Image: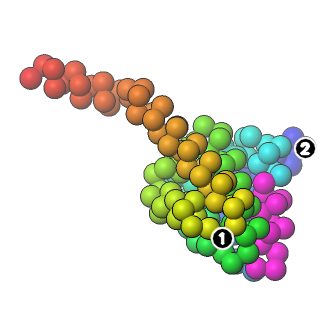
Amino acid sequence: RKYVEQRLLQPSQLQLLQDCFAIVDHSSLVQRLEALEQMLAVSPPLAKALASSAGSSGAAGAHSFLAAIAHLLHHRNPHVRLHFLRVVNRLSSCGRAQILKNHATLVDEIGGVAEGDSSRVVSKLAITTLEQLVADDDTAAAAPTADTAAAAGAGAAT
């Protein structure tokens, strides 16, 4: 298991994993999503690596991975929408929610699914996902960063 995990964590392998979702073959999409969910569940380092690459603006496949998530949240098959939300939950639960929140399109798409999805299960999971992202946002907003502390200090000095 460790060998496989080490191989998957290599940048070229992460790119290949992300490329799997750039090709939208509907017949195997659910199976690919289920496999990704399982990999993320058993390998927190893989989840962290994918979440990190998803926030890296320099990685070519990173943006397309998040764009595929946002686009496929409106797929006609509710199982596809459900599995993508589970993948988003796995990525955001590994301490990288701030990376996902930097992609307004993804958050907007999840909000749309939460408000009007035809499947109750998908809608409830979308609501839970949004709550998790907002809760992490509130926590991050409450904790001052070095930049906000410096700005506050500079404002007080003037």
Q: Which residues are magenta?
A: 26-37
Outermost residue toward the left? 158
> What is the number of the mark on residue 134?
none
Residue denoted by label 1 = 118
Front position in the image: 60 or 147:
147
Residue 10 appears left or right of 28: left
Outermost residue toward the right? 1
Taking the image as drawn, is residue 57 in sight?
no
Q: Residues within 10 Å of mark 1 (few under 14, many from 20)?
A: few
| Real-space CA distance between mark 2 and mark 1, rounded to the nearest whole angstrom | 39 Å
Residue 86 drawn in magenta: no
Residue 7 vs 30, above or below: the answer is above
Residue in the image at 54% along x and 62% along y? 115
Residue denoted by label 2 = 1
| Image depth: mark 2 or mark 1 in front | 1
Residue 24 vs 57, above or below: the answer is below
Q: Position of residue 70 (x, y in %)?
A: 57, 66
Residue in the image at 23% along x and 25% along y? 152
SS at circle 2 = loop
Residue in the image at 81% along x and 80% along y? 27
- Type of amino acid under label 2: Arg
Mark nearer the N terminus (2 vs 1) = 2
